Amino acid sequence: MPDRKLSFWRYFSLAYEDAARVLRGMWPTVLTVVAVVIVLGFLGRLGDNFVGTRLGQSVLDLLVAAATAYVISPYLIVLYRAVATNDMTRSAEALRGTPEAQRFAAWSVLTAFIIAAPDLLFAVFGPDVPPEQLSEANVNAGAMLMIFAITVGVWIFSVRATTLMPLLALEPGRASLPAAFAQSKGHFWFIVGVLLITMLPLLFGSVVVAALLGGLFGALAPIVMVPVGAAITGLTLVTAIAVSTRLYQRFVE
């Protein structure tokens, strides 16, 4: 039975210990996921050249995110299981097409749509100006208030549903959104705190690394950043899986 009284900092250390263990034992799986993210993201950037509106770009970004979530779903399942059970022998491709993988993929795609909702609404109702001119543009206060409220709602949903993906990967028979909400009920700010102290160092670290590479390599920085960015993406992905799995274990009945 997992210890339910672990501190914020213990979750921080466990997440990175789990991430290091999984990266060592399942680096081909992580590399495959990162490659899919990079390739589909690159195709999305190419598609931007054929889209002339901000709404079109938002829809394209959503489609790329949904396609990525669908393709990598079996790999995420085996990564969740590796964190929870230390089983690093499962084949992701053997899961593809199974009911549990299809359900995991469906929820992943639906989550991508939910997270993209504020951006899509801003593309529809916001001023059609470049970001640098946004402060000078005429905005619809009612529309902006609606978008802000929906953004807050999406954030709350994301926190409350933190254990949904671990549930789908580890207990597909009882996994549901109400089950995830029941697990996180009464623990909202605890979950926020754990996620912040775990994921913020990666965010700040990536910004610092990008700035250093820009200063050191100048025009070559984008080329150098490709492998570095891939490594950061892999570490971020596995750490996020690890911390959500640890939270699931805390709240599991």
Image (cartoon, grey):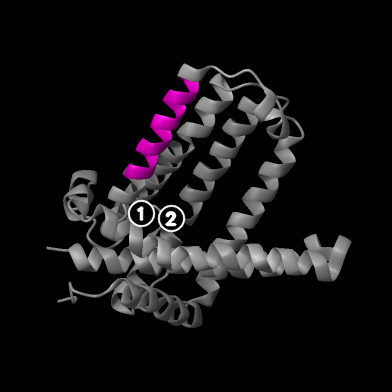
Task: State which quarter of the image contains the C terminus.
Answer: bottom left
Residues packed near mark 2 inside 10 Å, few (<14), some (14 to 19) or many (20 plus): many
Q: Main secondary structure of the magenta part?
A: helix
- The residue pinned by badge 2 equals 73
Q: Which quadrant of the figure has residue 85?
A: bottom left
- The residue pinned by badge 1 equals 101
Residue depicted at 38% across the width and 43% down the height: 155
Inter-mark Cα distance, 1 to 2: 7 Å
Rendered position, 128 above or below 224: above
| Callout 1–callout 2 Cβ contact below 8 Å | yes
The answer to which of marks 1 and 2 sits earlier in the sequence is 2
Question: Residue 103: x, y in percent?
Answer: 32, 48
Rendered position, 176 above or below 113: below
Residue 48 horizontal side relative to residue 197, left or right: right
The single residue placed furthest to the front in the displayed view is 136
Task: State which quarter of the image contains the N terminus.
Answer: bottom left
Q: Please say whether residue 154 is one of the residues in the magenta stretch.
A: yes
Residue depicted at 50% across the width and 19% down the height: 141
Rendered position, 48 above or below 207: above
How many labels were placed on the picture?
Answer: 2
Residue type at mark 2? Ser
- Element assignment for label 2: helix
Residue depicted at 28% across the width and 49% down the height: 160
Which contiguous range is marked in magenta?
143-156
For discs 1 and 2, the disc positioned in front in the rendered view: 2
Q: Which quadrant of the figure has residue 194?
A: bottom left
Q: Please say whether residue 190 is one of the residues in the magenta stretch.
A: no
61 or 105, which is in the foreground?
61
Residue 138 horizontal side relative to residue 11, left or right: right
In this orientation, does residue 92 appear? Answer: no
Question: Residue 216: x, y in percent?
Answer: 83, 71
Residue 92 horizontal side relative to residue 189, left or right: right
